[in-house]
Amino acid sequence: MTNMKKLGLTALAGSLAATSAFAGAVDVTGTAKVIYATQDQSEVTGNPYSMSQGLGFSGSGDLDNGMAIAYTYTMTNAAFSSSNLKLDMGDTGTLSFSNAANSSGINAYFDKMPTAGEQVWDDLDGQANGITTISNANTLGYVGTFSGIGLSMSYNKNAGANLHGSSKSIVVSSSELMDNVELGFGMGDKAGASNNSGTDLATAYATYTMGSITAGLQLSTIDVSAANGDTDRTHISVSMAINENLSASIGQSVVEFENPALDDQENTGYAVSYTMGSMTVAAFNNNENSSGGTAGTDDSVSEISVAFAF
């Protein structure tokens, strides 16, 4: 009996040793941010101070064929935020299965304008207008670069419980066609309630960098099946790296509605950020006129934050 016990323990120890040889490491990162935010005078927001926390878990491993697998999982304020599983196939590109908002396809390119903080439309009543995004839940993605041309695609099967069909998108981009210039064009098909009620998405952008200054222009179009429901967005922005720690930006976005009864929605934003080691101090001010196309319906938000990464 004693010999059998020794044999069993020896086999168990060998099994554990073999398993640990294939075990990978998981890295944990985190952020903590203290925020002071004010809305326009017509809104009641309560205490303007708040704090958000984030945790990120990441792990990776190599396959026998030379490929690599990587996984990330993030939480915000103790709730699930996003996850991403990637298969790096080297020169062939990267496949992904993701719940992250900007992992691949048109979701990763809906706003490519340079900024030192938030987008000019962020945290405002009309922030969803003119934004070319599709569902990011359980999305298959592919990203690759071939001869200086970037390719990014996404596919979301049966994008929602009440939606018919699937959402899909493709983006082509390059920063090697012209010196200091990055160009990109993307198209998407967003699932609707029926075969004939989907939404066509398109966006094109260009950025130009000269020293510490980057300027950009982006045009986006959302074509819906309903009459007078289309929107077009024009976004321009300029950012400047004042030094290695301090950056500032200014931008404007204009959304035009096909509906003749609606006015243009105009957004203007200013942002500044200062990084010192693992700490970042940032501030932005966004203003909006004719929210959702309704004349006289305006909105604004100002925010100052101190964030720590560890």
Image (spheres, helix red, strand yellow):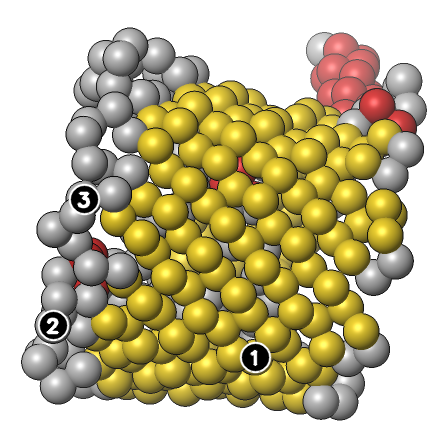
The location of residue 215, given as percent across then percent down, is 66, 69
Q: Amino acid at mark 1?
A: Ser
Along the viewing direction, whichever of 269 and 35 lies nearer the viewer: 269
Q: CA distance from mark 1 to mark 2?
A: 27 Å
Q: Secondary structure at mark 2?
A: loop
Which residue sits at x=41%, y=58%?
76
Upstream in sequence: badge 1 or badge 2? 1
143 relative to 56 in the view: left or right? right
Upstream in sequence: badge 1 or badge 3? 1
Badge 2 is on which residue?
A: 296
Which residue sits at x=27%, y=67%?
124
Badge 1 is on which residue?
A: 249
Q: Secondary structure at mark 1?
A: strand
Badge 3 is on which residue?
A: 259
Q: Amino acid at mark 2?
A: Gly
Q: Are marks 1 and 3 in contact (CB under 8 Å)?
A: no
Q: CA distance from mark 1 to mark 3?
A: 32 Å
Looking at the rendered image, the quarter that the C terminus falls into is bottom right
Along the viewing direction, whichever of 64 and 250 lies nearer the viewer: 250
Q: In the image, is residue 69 above or below residue 110? A: above
Q: Secondary structure at mark 3?
A: loop
The location of residue 50, given as percent across then percent down, is 30, 79
The answer to whether residue 191 of the structure is visible from this angle is yes
